[in-house]
Image (cartoon, rainbow, N blue to C red):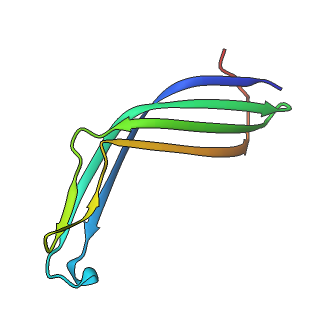
Amino acid sequence: MAAFAWLCPNLSAGLVRVRGQGVDVPETDTGLWSAAGLDVRVQHTFGARWFAEFAAGAAFNPRPHQVWLDGANVWTSGRFLLSGGLLAGYAWGPVARPQ
């Protein structure tokens, strides 16, 4: 059993579409947001092939998008995006481990 930690660049992007009919106003707005940052990943192996990996990251959005409908701000992409996740898996084929 061993644990490995490393940094990974990450890119995030998404398309946001607010349909006016859904919020009882006639307007529709569509926006694209994007961000770039770093993930910190930690992987722990169990035996030869089983592993668990945790990733936590932060990304900076240079152009936050805001959706305004009928004079009200209904959605805003923030300047920073924080994310995290846990993954468990099985390594098929040859297993290479970071040094």
Does residue 44 appear to the left or right of 78 in the view shown?
Answer: right
Q: Position of residue 61 (x, y in %)?
A: 29, 40
**Residue 91 visible, this angle:** no
Does residue 84 appear to the left or right of 70 in the view shown?
Answer: right
How many badges with numbers are in the image?
0
Name which quarter of the figure residue 72 lies in.
bottom left
Q: Residue at x 58, y 37 (%)?
A: 55
Q: Position of residue 31 (x, y in %)?
A: 22, 58
In the rendered image, the quadrant that contains the C terminus is: top right
**Residue 59 visible, this angle:** yes
Q: Considering only vertical position in the picture, is 46 above or below 63? A: above
Q: Considering only vertical position in the picture, is 4 above or below 10? A: above
Does residue 51 appear to the left or right of 56 in the view shown?
Answer: right
In depth, the one of 66 and 31 nearer the eye is: 66
Q: Position of residue 28 (x, y in %)?
A: 17, 73
Q: Considering only vertical position in the picture, is 64 above or below 31? A: above
In the displayed orientation, state which residue is furthest to the front.
Answer: 72
In the displayed orientation, state which residue is furthest to the top.
Answer: 99
Q: Position of residue 57 (x, y in %)?
A: 49, 36
